[in-house]
Amino acid sequence: MPVTSIDTNVDDHSIVVISDFPATLERIWQLWSDARQLEKWWGPPTYPATVTDFELVPGGKVGYYMTSPEGKKFGGLWRIESVEAPRRLTFTDAFADADGTAAEGMPVGTCVVELTEHDGGTRMVTTTTYATAEDLEKVVAMGMEEGLTGAISQIDDLLAAEAA
């Protein structure tokens, strides 16, 4: 399992996930920078993602929805703040309505993805920070820790399939 640690910190309203992969920095970056590859792992395993908009440039947006096993769609929206390929990506991550507009009253996280070479592979540190402890508690109650762990764990399957 690639997730080596997950830390929820109420004091700074953050979730930090550290993951290690037996792949190059450039390969792991592709999983973020290519919409079709992002769809293969973003979201919990039983809620596959469909990317509807993909502008991975500062000021751009990435729109997507995840589909539950029952067929219900849950939207999401990234607003891209910075892209420093192949090492760093920063974006705000919001829940979205059916039109792809940020859902009012729902927590918005600022996500920083950092990729570094580590033990012959790549370490990915994903830090998501919320405005308040209450926002953090809300996403944790919704299953964010399990969802992140499940989503990131799918990357192992992708890498294994490529190696086969």
Image (tube, rainbow, N blue to C red):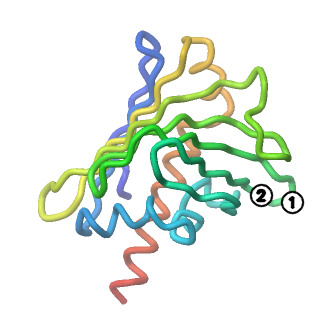
Instruction: Identify which amino acid the numbered label 2 is placed on.
Output: Thr
- Most foreground residue, 156 or 29: 29
Q: Which residue is mark 2?
A: 67
Please indicate, yes or no, whether residue 48 appears anywhere in the rendered image. no
Residue at 55% across / 66% down in the picture? Answer: 35
- Most foreground residue, 81 or 64: 81
Q: Find residue 85 and report its image quarter.
A: bottom left
Q: Quadrant of the C terminus?
A: bottom left
Q: Position of residue 66 (x, y in %)?
A: 72, 55
**Residue 71 image label:** 1
Q: Position of residue 83 (x, y in %)?
A: 37, 48
Disc 1, SS: loop
Residue at 42% across / 19% down in the picture? Answer: 9
Residue at 65% across / 43% down in the picture? Answer: 77
Q: Quadrant of the N terminus?
A: bottom left
Q: Find residue 26 and report its image quarter.
A: bottom left
Residue at 72% across / 25% down in the picture? Answer: 106
Task: Give neighbour class at mark 2: few <14, some 14-19, many 20+ (Cα, 10 Å).
Answer: some
* Residue at the extreme left: 119
Q: Position of residue 135 (x, y in %)?
A: 62, 18
Disc 2, SS: strand
Q: Are marks 2 and 1 in contact (CB under 8 Å)?
A: yes
Q: Position of residue 162 (x, y in %)?
A: 39, 84
Task: Give neighbour class at mark 1: few <14, some 14-19, many 20+ (Cα, 10 Å).
Answer: few
